[in-house]
Image: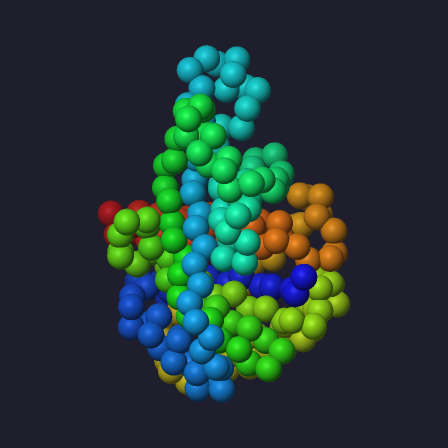
């Protein structure tokens, strides 16, 4: 499948994300001839173990991330960052976990926005909001290059496109910038050929980064 980078918005020190920045980013995608192609939505949940006995707690992960991706909503991806595991399951596993009450959802986030086509590139610009809320927690962008599925071979062209994007966005003088953090996919046992599991690992990584950034901002204010 096509290669994809997932980026998140890093606000400048002393600033936060807001809907105006999201609007400007979307307008930037259109200004570089991006053709809007509809909406997209993915979801991510943080699960925490409900194990009542210490022996059980030692045998099972204390927490993990569950992800439903826009491309394949009938699948559900579990990312256990502590053990560097990513597992693909049927979406029905969410109902099973709920009935077993072995894990509890701590935080559930929606990633949703507009999709744009730019030649062989596809951009998805979206907001990050808690489920059942419109409180903006972050901004993400999926950058996909359709002709290549090799992570290594795609680096140069993805990097060049990202530079062009950053240059176009810089003209708007926004208080922040997009950041690309590349996970070590080999640690998760993932090969060079790109897959939805690569996407799930990226989402887990950027969400952890966004939460850490948000917490550090709050700590600074306090």
Horizontal arrangement in the rendering, residue 171 relative to residue 3 (left or right): left
Q: Residue at x 59, y 76 (%)?
A: 121
Quadrant assignment for the N terminus: bottom right
The one of 45 and 176 positioned closer to us in this rendering: 45
The structure residue drawn at horizontal position 74% and vertical position 51%, both measured from the top left corner, is: 191
Q: Residue furthest left?
A: 222
**Residue 80: x %, y % from top left:** 56, 37
Q: Name the one closer to the observer, 189 or 114.
A: 114
Which residue: 38% across, 35% down?
105
Q: Tell me if residue 216 can be seen.
A: no
Residue 147: percent from the left, percent from the top?
A: 70, 72
Q: Residue at x 65, y 71 (%)?
A: 146
Residue 125: which quarter of the image?
A: bottom left
Q: Is residue 120 visible?
A: yes
- On the picture, is 112 further left or further right than 63? left
Q: Does 62 appear above or below 147?
A: above
The residue lying toward the viewer, choosing from 212 and 54, is 54
Displayed quadrant of residue 88:
top right
Q: Is residue 76 left or right of residue 26?
A: right
Q: Does 193 appear above or below 61?
A: below
Q: Is 1 situated left or right of 61 in this image?
A: right
Q: Position of residue 112 (x, y in %)?
A: 40, 61
- Give percent across and percent down for residue 82: 57, 35
């Amino acid at each position: 499948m096509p290669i994809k980078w997932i980026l998140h918005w890093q606000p400048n020190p002393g600033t936060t994300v807001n809907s105006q920045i999201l609007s400007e980013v979307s307008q930037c995608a259109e200004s570089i001839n991006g053709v809007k192609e509809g909406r997209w939505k993915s979801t991510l949940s943080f699960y925490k173990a409900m194990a009542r006995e210490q022996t059980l707690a030692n045998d099972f992960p204390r927490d993990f991330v569950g992800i439903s991706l826009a491309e394949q909503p009938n699948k559900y991806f579990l990312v256990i960052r502590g053990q560097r595991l990513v597992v693909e399951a049927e979406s029905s596993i969410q109902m099973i976990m709920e009935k077993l009450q072995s894990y509890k959802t701590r935080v559930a986030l929606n990633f949703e926005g507009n999709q744009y086509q730019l030649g062989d590139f596809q951009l998805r610009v979206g907001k990050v909001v808690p489920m059942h809320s419109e409180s903006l927690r972050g901004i993400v962008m999926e950058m996909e290059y359709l002709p290549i599925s090799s992570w290594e071979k795609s680096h140069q062209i993805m990097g060049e496109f990202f530079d062009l994007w950053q240059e176009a966005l810089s003209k708007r003088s926004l208080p922040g910038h997009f950041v690309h953090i590349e996970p070590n996919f080999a640690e998760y046992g993932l090969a060079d050929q790109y897959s939805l599991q690569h996407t799930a690992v990226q989402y887990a990584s950027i969400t952890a980064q966004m939460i850490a950034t948000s917490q550090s901002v709050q700590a600074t204010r306090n």
